[in-house]
Amino acid sequence: MFSQVLFWLLVLPGIALGLYAQSRIKYNVARYSRVRTGINATGAQVARHILDAAGLQTVAVETTEGMLSDHYDPRAKILRLSEGVYYSPTVASVGIAAHEAGHAIQDAENYLPLEARSYLVPFVQLGARIAPWAFIAGILFNMPGLAWAGAVLFGASSLFALITLPVEIDASRRALDQLVRHRIVSGPAEVDGVRAVLRSAAWSYVAAAVSAVGSWLFYLILLFSRSAGRRA
């Protein structure tokens, strides 16, 4: 009973925030995907312009399948935009494209949180495959060391989620700054539209961090309580 109540207390906030973030993202992207920018530039054109202005002519801009699958690949130096963003001259598209260009600029400037997040990727991938099984096996077979190993690997995901927050917030700040500086968006309506899209996306990263930390705390508290019970 204790573990069930604890689970919901620690994990439910992340789930609730995640649902809220997804609803805001869908609403704002749908709303501002119907609003064209004054200069009528597509997401691909905006990304290319921002990258070139930052001296990043070697960073390619490509299309990728999927909705809101936009991302920057720091290893390949490629900025990939979903087709809906790549070809669309809307407020939502230029905001998303500029955000991803912001990541490319971070990479070029060796932005520390981005580098730290990149170093954590192998540990997060390893943890995603091994951590649940190690934790469950440690609990089932009364092997505390194995369970703790699983909990530590879960911690890598939590740290990754926390480091992601400043990375994404900074990329959004850079995006809005670049869009205004280069006069890609102008006027309160366009600027507020970009800000709404970027802020709603930021909530998804907040939700991911809350969920990851909550889950990790659940595993840690559960292990501490079992250890205390064995000593009693």
Image (cartoon, helix red, strand yellow):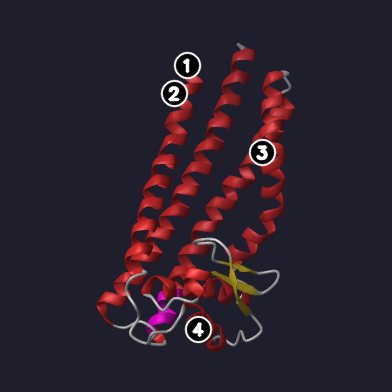
Pick the residue in front: 151 or 18: 18
Distance between the alpha carbons at the discs numbered 2 and 4: 51 Å
Whether label 1 touches label 2, CB < 8 Å: yes
Amino acid type at mark 3? Val
Instruction: Please name the residue shown 32% across and 74% down the image.
Output: 35
Circle 2 residues within 10 Å: few <14, some 14–19, many ≥20: few
Q: Which residue is mark 4?
A: 45
Q: Which residue is mark 1?
A: 1
Q: Position of residue 48 (x, y in %)?
A: 54, 83
Q: Which residue is mark 3?
A: 152
Q: Position of residue 198 (x, y in %)?
A: 40, 65
Q: Is residue 100 left or right of residue 177?
A: right
Q: Position of residue 226 (x, y in %)?
A: 60, 19
Q: Which quadrant would residue 118 be assigned to in this image?
A: bottom right
Among numbered discs 1 and 4, the one appearing first in the sequence: 1
Distance between the alpha carbons at the discs numbered 2 and 3: 23 Å
Among numbered discs 2 and 3, the one appearing first in the sequence: 2
Amino acid type at mark 2? Val
Amino acid type at mark 1? Met
* Residue range (magenta): 175-180
Whether label 1 touches label 4, CB < 8 Å: no
